Amino acid sequence: MEIAEVLKLADELIFAKTGEHIDYLQKAILEGTFQGRTYPEIAEGTHSSEGHTRDIGSELWQIFSEGLGEDITKRNFRAILEKAKFDNFSSAIGRVGRDYVAINNLNICQERARSPTEPQNPQQISKQLHIDLGDAPEIFTFFDRTSELSTLENWITGDRTRLIALLGISGTGKTTLSLRLIDEIKTGFDYVIYRSLRFSPTLDATLTNLLQIFSQQSEIPQNIETKISQILDYLRKYRCLIVLDDVQMLFSSGQLAGKYKTGYEDYQLFFKLIGEVCHQSCLILNSWEKPREIARLSKDNHPVRCFVLASLGVAAKEILQSQKLADEETWSTLIDIYQGNPLWLELTATLIRELFGGRVAEFLQCEMPILDEGLQFQLSQPFGRLTAAELAVMIYLANSAEPVAVSQCLNKISFSPSEIVNAVRSLGNRFLLDAIEKEKITLFSLNPVLKQHVKTEYSQSA
């Protein structure tokens, strides 16, 4: 008797009963039972709770009992199949008589024996798309990100990547890109969900919210471990695309980048499980701080990827065009100064239109860069999260005429070498530094906008 034959029969019976194929946990329970493993052992191997594993097992034995006309339990499952000469089951499956299929004196009703590839009523099992975008902002304009969309779509639909961190400094358009991505590929999923974490919900609250979408008629468990287990089961059973925005709000201020707030450490385990446990779904994390676990998980051949969203490039001209600015020949200069950052350019373009009559050439006669009040506020948010050592590094770089190496920082900043090295790495994970390679040495600098912000806000500290 082969486990493959057991799984084939199970798939037939489950499909006939529920209209769904065998899922990851059901398969694990059958394989574990076939190998003589206990429920606790099966639960541990699938990162599921023991209680949830037992519940799924009970449902599974009920399906077998109804389908095969025998009282089947975990204890007698293998013995009954051995007694029934299971080696002839596979040849009998699919031979549908008027009322039932006979398999060595065990009867499977015609509906339950029907092949999954030949459903009696295709409409009963047609794919239904569930979209819940919650508090997603409405997108009125989208500037060209064709290459970025293509890469992300290939990772998700082609490579079946489970966990993607969409990263970049505030204003680069992570939310807009992820929502456009949803619109492009939503038909390939059973569930599409967007949620913002801007108000720092606990993992328990986030999981409860997701389970309410997946299991609208079911009671939500109280135990967080069970909630995680159920979410993973849904991610195996259905093809889901979930976007969690503003992930940086889970991290502490005044700490190195990516350190979770007290009481939010469970998110790290949850994201780790999403990347490591086998399932058919994808979770996208939007953040302007790089989660620490992502760096460890995103390796070659792993289903975990990082995508750093950078300048819009030439496509940023669409922003200036939409604001009806003049002097198109100078637009490239303006885009370079403001790093092709969509939000930075939109705020600056509004300033040019209101105070300079939309004339970019006149604006550029001023000492650059000029930071709109709204832009200053946007930049104050990531800067407000820096450690003292990080801020010291930023002030030093802002007042350096040329890019500098870490070794130069060690001699000029009054923090220990370890604090400075960790600060530089953390600033990189916040996307506040530019790094270049020169003569086999890595040099760091600030872009003009960040440099001007530091000089404006921290001139006394400089």
Image: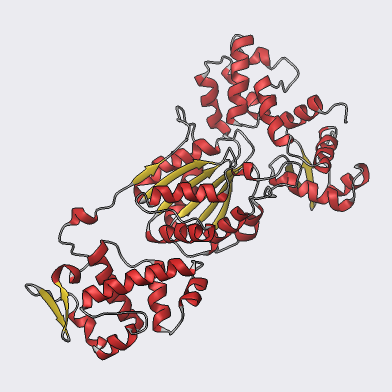
Q: Residue at x 42, y 42 (%)?
A: 182
Q: How is the image coloured?
A: secondary structure
Q: Nearer the viewer, residue 120 or 450?
A: 120
Looking at the rendered image, the quarter that the C terminus falls into is top right
Residue 330 sits in quarter: top right
x and y percentages locating residue 263 in the rendered image: 65, 50
Q: How many marks?
A: 0
Up the image or down, 203 lies above or below 352; here it is below
Q: Nearer the viewer, residue 422 or 53?
A: 53
Residue 315, can we see it? yes
Left or right relative to 84: residue 334: right
Up the image or down, 132 lies above or below 294; here it is above
Left or right relative to 58: residue 151: right
x and y percentages locating residue 332 in the rendered image: 61, 26
Up the image or down, 437 lies above or below 42; here it is above
Q: Nearer the viewer, residue 362 or 1?
A: 1
Q: Residue at x 72, y 23 (%)?
A: 369
Up the image or down, 154 lies above or below 276; here it is above
x and y percentages locating residue 305 in the rendered image: 56, 54
Residue 238 sits in quarter: bottom left
Q: Residue at x 55, y 21 (%)?
A: 320
Looking at the rendered image, the quarter that the N terminus falls into is bottom left
Left or right relative to 129: residue 222: right
Left or right relative to 95: residue 242: right
Residue 159, can we see it? no
Q: Residue at x 33, y 71 (%)?
A: 60
